[in-house]
Image (tube, coloured by chain):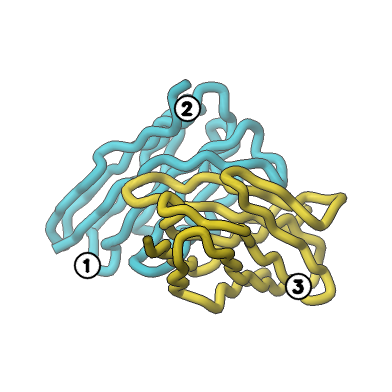
Amino acid sequence: AQSVTQLDSQVPVFEEAPVELRCNYSSSVSVYLFWYVQYPNQGLQLLLKYLSGSTLVKGINGFEAEFNKSQTSFHLRKPSVHISDTAEYFCAVQKTSYDKVIFGPGTSLSVIP
Amino acid sequence: GAGVSQTPSNKVTEKGKYVELRCDPISGHTALYWYRQSLGQGPEFLIYFQGTGAADDSGLPNDRFFAVRPEGSVSTLKIQRTERGDSAVYLCASSLSGREGETQYFGPGTRLLVL
């Protein structure tokens, strides 16, 4: 069965600084990978996803993530964060043959002015 | 356009009572998903509908939980004999066809508190 690990439960970062949110997964088969963001009092929203092709994926709001098959990682990065990026970020995995989406426990990003 | 909507936004009930949570997916989306999110955790899959039928209900924790989608649009999650441990945010999502890798669009959730 697949699983997702997000080692950092909370990440504080100063405004305009770069940030990396880590995600590792375990699976014995090919997977699709997702990053979702949950702003306070809102539903989850897709930031980006990796299905195939280029391992560097660009998403909305200046975020990008890199799929690394050998390290089974899909870390999320942004070169310069804004106050509005303060939110909960969830990494998720899904087998390429149908299976449910498995979410990680989330990382709370707090951007400090 | 309209996104996924869920009602009620908050529900407080007493232990042992029955509750119904409603999800209205994006129009035209054939796939609908229910998740449960406990405090400090990611969404946990409960059930997936393709049209009117439950294609995967492997995430339902026990037989107190049941969900329907009779006309392939609105879905209702039903919880019988609620327990304090059922307190969580219940999330609904929909996607266009349910294909692997497809983006799921989430509603704002229903926060259920069982006293």
Q: Is residue B39 left or right of residue A48?
A: left
User: Could you tell me which secondary element the residue under label 2 belongs to?
Assistant: loop
- Residue B106 lies, in percent from the top left, at 47, 42
Q: Which residue is mark 3?
A: A72
* Residue beneath the point at 43% across and 39% down: B68
Q: How many marks?
A: 3
Distance CA(mark 2)–CA(mark 3): 37 Å
Distance CA(mark 2)–CA(mark 1): 30 Å
Q: Which shade of the palette goes to chain A?
A: yellow
- Residue A12 lies, in percent from the top left, at 43, 71
Q: Is residue B113 left or right of residue A113?
A: left
The residue at the far right in this view is A53
Q: Which chain is cyan?
A: B
Q: Quadrant of residue A76?
A: bottom right
Q: Which residue is mark 1?
A: B84
Is the same chain shared between marks 2 and 3? no
